[in-house]
Structure formats: C-alpha cells, structure tokens
C-alpha cells in the first residue's frame, strides 16, 4: 500500500515545524513508517538550491524557478520512492507555499505557477495539508524572538499578510485537502488540532 503525503504550511512564525516531529513520533508509535523532509530542500541538490533562495537576492521568477527545480529533484529522488514503499511523508512546506510566497507575497503570475506545478508534479498533490493559520502581526512577534532572519523572514508585515491571503486562496480552492488550524493557540492546543485532524482520516 502506498504511503500518505502530508504537508505542513503556514507563514514564518506560525509554529508548524514544532509539530512535524511530534506527528512523526505519533505515527511511528502506531507502527507506521515515516519520512520527515522539507522544502525547499530534502535532497543534496535541493538543499543547495534552498541556500540560494533563502540568502541570495533575486526576482520572483528566479525564486519560483529555483523552488520548482528543487521540488522536482525532491519528488523524483525522495518523496515518490518513499510513498511507493509504503512510508508516510511529512513535508515542511510544498507547492502551496510557492503560491503563497511567490504568488501572494511577491505578486508573481499565478498562471505561470500553475504551469510549473503541472510540469513538475505531474498530478502529485498532498493527501492532507495542515495549514497553521496565524495573523501576520502575531507571527512577526514570534519571529523576532527566535533567530537571525533569512531574506523571507526579514520581510515586512504587509508581505506576510499577502502570503496569508495566498494560503487562504489555496485552501478555499481545495477544501477537501486542507485542514485549517488555529496557530494562535498554545502549543498543546495546536497539537490537539493536529492529532484530531489526522485521526479523522480513514487511513490508519
């Protein structure tokens, strides 16, 4: 049986990454095989492209092309093989992030992104997307407390408001795949939302 592909989405500061390992442990405790990965990244080539995207100045089209190039290698060499062998893949961001950040945040052409999505993914979409939704102002407060920002984290609040709107548009277009979580809640309360959402799926 093929594994399930679960993606974690949200603006920087939403706290999504805190729950990926928790869900991996929860699934493994139930006898499931799990691969945890991230985007951009997940393979040697994709991680090299990630460093360029996060730290080198470039326009929105270049960003999008690099992100999709990384995604192609990630899908071909890690995600698809893991799913085929029956492992569940938990991925910190996927294509919804590209539509939110490059599309919503940067204002890049959504039709071009849709074309790239079709070329690179060839129909592959997550089975479930957990969107950790958080107001941009609260996310900004959280980001200030954690680390030196990369070129995305350093963007202003208006940028992240556009990114959040980009996520909202993707969720509205595919409500069966998306689960919208209130990421403004305390960590334990957010985890309860994650657990309840996953338990409700008829996969296990």
Image (cartoon, helix red, strand yellow):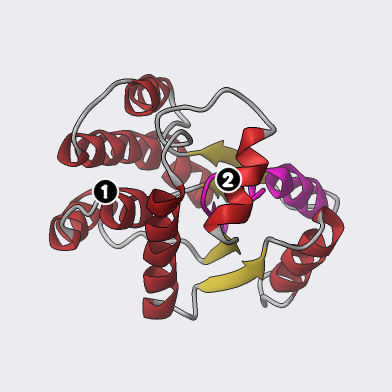
* Residue 90 numbered tag: none
Residue segment shown in magenta: 1-28
Q: Position of residue 62 (x, y in %)?
A: 18, 34
Asked which quadrant contains residue 76, the reply is top left
Quadrant for the C terminus, please: bottom right
Eyeballing the image, is 100 above or below 56?
below
**According to the image, label 1 marks what residue?**
106
What residue is drawn where x is 51% and y is 51%? Answer: 11
Asked which quadrant contains residue 37, the reply is top right
What residue is drawn where x is 37% and y is 21%? Answer: 55
Is residue 56 toward the left or the right of residue 127 in the image?
A: left
Regarding residue 203, the answer to whether it shows in the image is: yes
Eyeballing the image, is 174 above or below 88?
below
Is residue 95 toward the left or the right of residue 68 in the image?
A: right
**According to the image, label 2 marks what residue?**
140
Q: Position of residue 90 (x, y in %)?
A: 59, 49
């Amino acid at each position: 049986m093929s594994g399930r592909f679960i993606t974690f989405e949200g603006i920087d500061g939403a706290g999504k990454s805190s729950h990926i390992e928790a869900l991996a442990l929860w699934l493994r405790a139930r006898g499931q095989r799990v691969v945890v990965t991230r985007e951009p990244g997940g393979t040697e080539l994709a991680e090299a492209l990630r460093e360029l995207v996060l730290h080198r100045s470039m326009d929105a089209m270049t960003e999008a092309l690099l992100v999709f190039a990384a995604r192609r290698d990630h899908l071909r060499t890690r995600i698809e093989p893991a799913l085929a062998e029956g492992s569940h893949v938990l991925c910190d961001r996927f294509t919804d992030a590209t539509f939110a950040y490059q599309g919503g945040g940067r204002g890049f052409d959504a039709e071009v992104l849709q074309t790239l999505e079709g070329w690179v993914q060839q129909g592959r979409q997550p089975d479930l997307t957990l969107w950790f939704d958080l107001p941009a102002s609260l996310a900004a407060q959280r980001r200030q407390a954690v680390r030196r920002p990369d070129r995305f984290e350093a963007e202003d609040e208006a940028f992240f408001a556009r990114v959040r709107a980009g996520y909202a548009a993707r969720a509205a277009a595919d409500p069966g795949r998306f689960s919208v979580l209130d990421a403004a809640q305390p960590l334990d309360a957010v985890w309860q939302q994650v657990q309840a959402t996953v338990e409700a799926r008829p996969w296990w």
